[in-house]
Image (cartoon, rainbow, N blue to C red):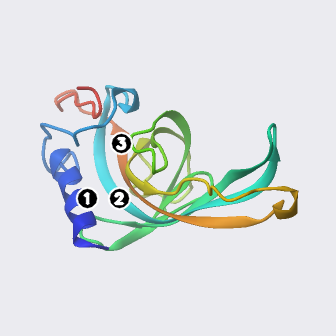
Amino acid sequence: MSWQVRATLSFALMACGGRAQEKDAADCPAGIPASLAPAPDQHLAFVRHATGVQRYACAVGQAGHVWSLVAPEAELFDRDGKQQGRHYAGPTWQDADGSTVVGAKRAAATVDATAIPWLLIDAVSHGATPGVMTAVTSVQRINTVGGLAPTSECAAAQSGATTDVPYSADYLFYETRTSPTLRNLRCGAR
């Protein structure tokens, strides 16, 4: 992982206070659209940087053949650059401890026309293995680079073909607040 990515990830953690139990946060990363704010009772628990691909398949759509997202395939890294899990179909995030969270998109915002949108994702299920993902209630995808569907032709001759498009992003994982004394912080609500 490059030093620029580590710096961005470290800033995101410092700006939102890292794990809420370690430090009360005063700010969140700048530039997150208000439409991507988590619920008011949620706090930032941890951040992971993802590097991998968005896999697309050429499939028949309403307007003919189009490139459609199949699934992400990415490695997740902590703020020190240590691999800490992976991100794959579902969408699913799996931590190195074996815990998982599966999400469903709630909102999207195009921040950079050359990259996949930023997202707010609600947790819809968790795996049986307890761990850091067990309490996650929502996820933000921010700081995206690349990952857009191919611009190459997708026609009947390519039907079923797949292609991988490199991408990177930061994922901010939120948990529902259990202590009324913690400050109500909504990342994205400015």
Q: Residue 103: percent from the left, percent from the top?
A: 54, 44
In this view, the mark in front (1 or 2): 1
Name the amino acid, label 3.
Tyr
Q: Secondary structure at mark 1?
A: helix
How many other residues sit within 10 Å of disc 3, few (<14), some (14-19) or many (≥20)? many
Spot occupied by residue 147 in the image (x, y as percentages of width and height) = 52, 57
Where is residue 93 shown, x and y percent of the image? 50, 57
Query: Which image quarter holds the C terminus?
Result: top left
List the residue tagged with mark 2.
Answer: 48
- Which one is nearer the viewer's eye here, 40 or 4? 4
Considering the image in quadrants, where does the N terminus appear? bottom left
Q: Earlier in the sequence, mark 1 or mark 2?
A: 1
Foreground label between 2 and 3? 2
Q: Nearer the viewer, mark 1 or mark 3?
A: 1
Query: Which sits earlier in the primary sequence, circle 1 or circle 3?
Result: 1
Picture residue at 84% right of the left edge, 59% below the top: 159
For residue 174, the mark is: 3
Instruction: Please state which amino acid type lies under the numbered disc 1.
Output: Leu
